[in-house]
Amino acid sequence: MFFMPSDVTTEQRQEIHRAIDSGGIWRGRYRVQRRNGRTFPAAAVLAPIRDAEGVITGMTGVSRDISERLDAEQAIRRHAKQQSLIAAFSRTVLTLYNLDDLQDQTVAVIRDGLDVEYCEIALPNPDGNGWMLKAGLGWEHGWVGQSIFDGEAPTHYQEVLASGEPILVANFRNEQRFKSLEIHQAHGIVSAAAVPISGAGGVHGVLGALSHDPDRFTLEDIDFLQSLANTLEAALERKQAEDKLTQLAQFDVVTGLPNRSLFRDRLSQALAQVQRNGGLLGVLFVDLDGFKAVNDTLGHTAGDTLLDQVGQRLQYSVRSGDTVSRLAGDEFAILLTNLAKTEDAGKVAEKILAECARAFHVGGNQTFVSASIGVALHPGDGNDTDQLLKNADIAMYRAKEQGRNNYQFYLPQMHERALERMRLEAELRGALSRDEFVLHYQPKVDLHNGEICGFEALLRWQHPERGLVPPVKFISILEDTGLIVPVGEWVIRTVCAQILSWQELGMKIHPVAVNLSSRQFQHKNIDIVIRRILDSTGVNPRLLEFEVTESLLMQDAEEAVRMLHNMKSFGVRLSVDDFGTGYSSLAYLKRFPLDVLKIDRAFIRDCITDPDDATIVQAIISLAQNLKLKVVAEGVETEAQLHFLRALGCDHMQGYFFSKPVEIDAVNRMLAEDVRLQSKFVDNGAGERTVLLVDDNEYDLLLWRDAFAPLDCRILTAVSAELALDILANNAIDIVISDQNMPTMSGTRFLSTVRQFYPDAIRIMLTGDESNETLPNAVNEAGVHRFLSKHWSPERLLKEVRETCRQLSHLDPAQRVTQGFA
Ligand code: C2E
Ligand code: MG
Ligand code: MG
């Protein structure tokens, strides 16, 4: 009876018998059962046993346990397979650009390499709470792509994430460390292997395999998973770098908006579509006003933040299908598609202007910038990308010329203007060395005495062919090109030389104001330049005033504030030019060492006709008085404006009404002749004031008016006390002359009301009845300063009034004593 291993197949048995029967040896493998019932794989050699005659009587053999060798062979085969899978995977990922494909491919390789039931890529949920099954195989429908757990209890995923180390779970049922998840229970999962997906930024996910069998995974499996995770990570990093490059190539880093090249792509696509299907599209060229100043004074980081905020507001102003792009620096372009009509582009531009008008908050500072916008449309203003952008740019320049903070539609004639600007720029570059700049001077007048109290130096360009070019034509070009720095320095030097020349000629010397652009503060040394000029010329600093713009103050940049204080410490005066056009507040102005506010001429122009402007002027004057600043009204052109300003207590005026800016020869003549404001416009005593005549008798009123006409003052009349009070409410009245005998209100009552409300007004009573009762009442109640008799001649009346005013105007109202009849 041969012993035969347990699992030898019938064929194998026959084969062994054949071999032994024929006297040969059999070599082969089979499983052998131990006594305890377990089997093992064995390699066997069987040979016949022969008796003395050589007859085969049996079989002998040796079996060797080869289970270890087999395991090793199997491991090698699996390892080889896994290696080739990883190599293939490394090649495949190079061609995969889609993140989902990359992840799906990864889990497929896990399944092939480990021959396992479940594989997965798990990532922390975006909100940091729990995990999601990002990609997987073997899972029941509905799990992949979902959050698989959102609690806080420890999971093996969490452990991998926290430690950055792989983990083997032999059997979830015996695990104390982790919670068994519902998804695992639902799938009957018992064991798992998981490795971290980690890169430069740390661990950001888990790659894993899971099985129904306990003890399913080995350390080799972990190695395989880790190699895969590393390959996946390398692919992800490469992809991120590529995405970043694409982003950089198409988007602006500061604002995240499409850059010029992407904008041009989108514009040319939109153009092609409009040219195919019809329709209207618009290009808006948006350039910020005063951005350079913010950038240079608050710093580049602040500048970038501002650009980012502007980008957001622009995006907010357009529809989602439109493209907002940052072209360069402070230039943005907007593509408006599907416009219904031309005006719609204008509406968007208006919306942008309104958006920009709100304060920007940058690095703890509140700052303002406006925008100048040019609009070009297709069809009409260009048939290709370049032309449309160029024409929108030209229209934007026009908006700048129009005073900024506005928008302009492109017009063909603008093209010519843009060329002109380029020509001017080229010519300006040599103007200083060719000595083509000159200064004109405009006098400022003291409204209290009518005398010249200072000058403003205003730059002119004496062009060989163009003639005298005014600053509006070239200052902005000087500013844009930076030429304003040397030219501005030339202005200060020339003014100082002029002051010295007046001194040498022994003429009366007045302070001269010099305009400074914000751009001149960007070099951070304007104070030092001024100090140097003062030192080298020896000019008295009190004779120099510097006019700075409100926008410079608004930026409230530390550097500018420091330079202004420094300048002030030299002894020069500082004024705010064109005040009222910015957004300064009282609190703001207090921070600066100012001496003078110059009210912008835009408010003066309409202060007589526009109540809003009148209120603004009034408010600025009282603001200045509160801050102990002098006020200069700019651009005073008419007598009415002058009266209005004087009545409000404005200190100085500058404007064509007195003199235009003139050449130095004309200034010298003015000074030599002591030219001054006509005395009737000046606040210096009787004869230059407003008189109110009140009498119920219209005929008498006319008589009095004629009698007082030589007083050389404004004469207003009222036929009743009520009307007179109305006039008093609306006009600054210096002298009130009232009849005593009036039907609705007596002269005494009327003048005592005047005394109460307008105590400064000189009160004169006219009476036909010089009885003893009138006098005491009038003196006690109405504080009447003078009584005049209706019976006196016009000459005498005139003389008396003149005399009264002369005497009283030097006194405080309280000191004025009543005088009776002469
Ligand atoms: P600004 O400093 O406000 O100067 C006053 C401007 O108002 C001057 O214009 C002056 O001629 C004008 N003006 C004065 N009175 C009247 C008036 O009654 N009616 C009207 N309609 N205008 C009046 P100008 O000389 O053309 O100068 C314009 C601007 O150019 C100046 O405005 C100033 O901002 C700038 N500017 C002039 N010279 C310089 C300079 O040397 N440096 C700098 N940075 N800017 C300058
Ligand atoms: Mg000025
Ligand atoms: Mg001004």
Image (cartoon, rainbow, N blue to C red):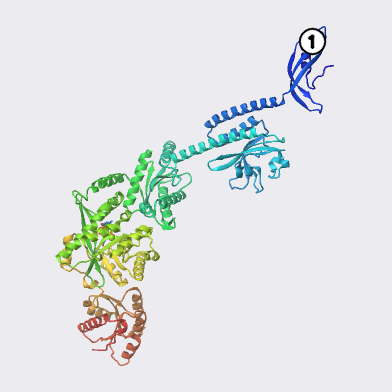
Q: Is residue 778 above or below residue 73?
A: below
The residue furthest left is 505
* Location of the C terminus (image quadrant): bottom left
Q: Secondary structure at mark 1?
A: helix
Q: Is residue 574 above or below residue 707?
A: above
Q: Nearer the viewer, residue 269 or 169?
A: 169
Q: Amino acid at mark 1?
A: Asp
Q: Nearer the viewer, residue 26 or 627?
A: 26
The residue furthest top is 53
The residue furthest right is 1
Q: Which residue, given by chain and number where applicable, does mark 1 sit on? A: 21
Quadrant in the rendering for residue 393: top left
Q: Is residue 335 visible?
A: yes
Residue 377 picture location, percent across and down: 38, 43
On the picture, is 358 further left or further right than 617?
right
Q: Quadrant of ligand 2?
A: bottom left
- Label 1 within 8 A of ligand 1 by Cβ: no
The residue shown at (34%, 73%) is 730
Quadrant in the rendering for residue 79: top right
Quadrant in the rendering for residue 81: top right
What number of labels is visible?
Answer: 1
* Location of the N terminus (image quadrant): top right
Residue 748 picture location, percent across and down: 34, 86
Residue 638 picture location, percent across and down: 26, 66
Residue 684 picture location, percent across and down: 24, 75
